[in-house]
Amino acid sequence: MIVSHRHRFVSIKAEKTAGTSLEIALSEFCGPDDIITPITPNDEAVRAELGFRTAQNYHLPLSVYTRLEWAKLALKRERAAFKNHDPATKIRRVLSDAQWDGYFKFVFERNPWDKVLSYYHHLGGDPKFGSVWEFMQSGRGGRIRGFELYTVGGVPVVDRIYKHEERAEALADITERLGLPKPLKMPSYKAKGGFRKDRRSYREVLTDREAELIADIYAREIRLLGYTF
């Protein structure tokens, strides 16, 4: 997740949408006051090698602490902080009305059938779960965070939901909207790459009952963005 005061944007990070690679790319344009959440040590090393800003300003200010966060600070010396996949409701806490209304808020979403298959491979695939059906029955396939991060009461609160499948057009649009000094480009380094060895389309892999179950679980995203199997 990134909040840039320099370029007036909020980038919410849904799971399994190449969000880490996007964060690395966006970090190039961030200033010293911007909020950048931590990513994995390997990914942070890549970001540093590129000369981009790494994780910074991600601890919440004391002025917005909840009672629970105060308790954790008092009892565990644990500071409240932003994390990778935080929802809009949490981000909203540290922004003024003018900032929230004026900043360009966006997120990337992905075809749910493809996203589940990607997550299946990421978590271990066939050696760990067996079939995709068994993976879904375990409950893991229904826990990919996305819709609840950029909506409140089922209504989107971002200005734009980009499709993962239309990334080139999306990056060009973001560049123009934010007035970036040069085109926003994804790094050649693929964060979390290499997990999915089977590169066949989800249409070739998923059975009818697997596809139907995924459609039921992720019906909100499918309805909102018009995805089809």
Image: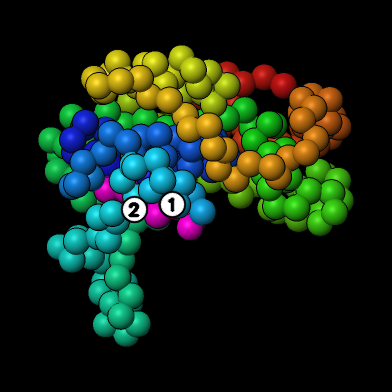
Q: Which residue is painted at 69% across and 31% down in the image?
A: 113
Residue hosting label 2:
55
Q: Is residue 37 magenta?
A: yes
Q: Which residue is painted at 49% across and 17% down in the image?
A: 168
Classify mark 1: helix, strand or loop. Answer: helix
Q: Is 223 positioned to the left or the right of 184 in the image?
A: right
* Residue 214: percent from left, percent from top: 71, 36
The amino acid on which the numbered mark 2 sits, given as a three-letter code, is Ala
Residue 105 in sight: yes
* Residue 218: percent from left, percent from top: 62, 36
**Front of the two marks 1 and 2:** 1
The disc, 1 or 2, on the residue closer to the chain's N-terminal end is: 1
Residue hosting label 1:
44
- Label 1 neighbourhood size at 10 Å, few (<14), some (14-19), many (20+)? some
Classify mark 2: helix, strand or loop. Answer: loop
Which residue sits furthest bottom?
A: 75
Task: Give the quarter of the image for residue 129.
Answer: bottom right
Q: Evaluate if marks 1 and 2 touch, with contact meaning CB atoms under 8 Å apart.
A: yes
Q: Which residue is painted at 30% across and 20% down in the image?
A: 182
Task: Give the quarter of the image for residue 184.
Answer: top left
Q: Which residue is painted at 48% across and 32% down in the image?
A: 187
In depth, the one of 170 and 203 nearer the eye is 170
Q: How is the structure coloured here?
A: rainbow
In depth, the one of 93 and 106 nearer the eye is 106
Specify the segment rendered in magenta: 35-41
* Residue 160: percent from left, percent from top: 38, 24
- Label 2 neighbourhood size at 10 Å, few (<14), some (14-19), many (20+)? some
